[in-house]
Image: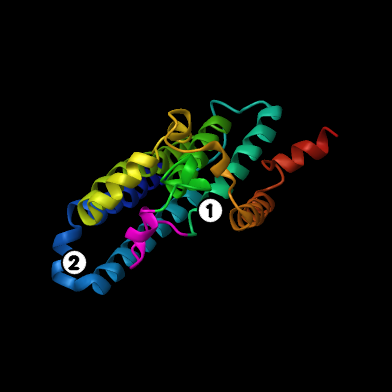
Amino acid sequence: MALASLALAMLAFVGSHFALSHAYRRTLIGHFGEAGFTGVYSIVAAATLFWVFVSWRMADNSMPVWIAPGWWWVVASALMLVASILLAGSLVRNPAFPHPSAQKQAARPATGVFAITRHPMNMAFALWALVHLSLWWSPRNLIVAAGILILAIGGSIGQDSKKRAVQGKSWSQWEARTSLVPFAALIRGRAKWKDTAPGWIALAGGLVFWLLVTAFHATTVSPLAWIYQNS
C-alpha cells in the first residue's frame, strides 16, 4: 500500500510539473494572472512533494535487490559534490529564470556551470537520480530516483521549447553556444574549456550544501561512515 501511494505521489509530482509548466501554463496564466499562477504552481508542487515525502517515509526500504560495493559510495559522494556545485551555480545569472534581465543573460558567453550545460539545475537533479540509482535498488528508491530523472530530462527539453517561444532569437542563440548534455558544447567547440571554472559562489555554495546533505544521511549510508570504517 505504501509503495502504491509513493508511486501515485511521484506520478502526481512529476505529472503536475509537466502539466503546469507546459500543457496548461498559458491557460492558467490567462485565468489567474502571473502572480496567481505562481501561487497555484507553488501550492501544487508543495502538496505533491509532501505526499512523496510521507509515502517515502512509510515505504519499506529493506531487502534491496542491489547494493553498490563500498568503494563506489565514495565515488558517488564525489559525484554528488559535482551535482551540488552545478545546483549552486545555477542560482546565479541563470537566463532560464523568469526575471527581466533573462534575455540579457542569454546574450552573454557561456561561462561557469553554464559552459558545462545550459540546464545546470536540472542536470544536478539528473545526476542525483543516477547516483542514487547506482547505489541502492530498493523499490522506494527506484520509484523516486526514476521520477526525478524523468522530470529533470523532460523538464530541460520542455524548458528549451518554452524559452524559445518566449525569448525567441536570444534563447536560440544561447542554445547554439551551450548544450543540454553536460560537456557536449565543450567537446564540439561551441564553448571554451577555460570558461568552465565555476566561480567561488558555486564552489562554496555547493560545498556547504554537500556537507549538509552528507551529514544529514544516516551513518549507515553516508560515504563518510565508509571512509571512517576503512581507514
- Examine the image and state in which quarter residue 212 appears: bottom right
Frontmost residue, 84 versus 54: 84
Which circle, 1 or 2, is nearer the viewer?
1
Badge 2 local density, few (<14 within 10 Å), some, or many (20+)?
some
The residue that appears at 30% across and 53% down in the rendered structure is 17
Magenta stretch bounds: 93-107
Q: Is residue 63 left or right of residue 175?
A: right
Tell me the quadrant of the picture where the C terminus can be found. top right
Amino acid type shown at disc 2: Ile
How was this image coloured? rainbow
Circle 1 is placed at which residue position? 89
Frontmost residue, 179 versus 2: 179
Instruction: Decide whether the magenta segment is chiefly helix, strand or loop.
Output: loop
The residue that appears at 41% across and 45% down in the rendered structure is 118
Lower sequence index among marks 1 and 2: 2
Q: Which mark is residue 80?
A: none
Circle 2 is placed at which residue position? 29
User: Is residue 36 in the magenta section?
Assistant: no
User: Is residue 104 in the magenta section?
Assistant: yes
Frontmost residue, 18 versus 175: 175
Residue 197 locus on image (x, y percent): 59, 46
Residue 121 locus on image (x, y percent): 46, 49
Q: Is residue 143 above or below residue 84?
A: above
Residue 96 locus on image (x, y percent): 36, 55
Give SS at disc 2.
helix
Give SS at disc 1.
helix
Amino acid type shown at disc 1: Gly
The residue that appears at 34% across and 65% down in the rendered structure is 42
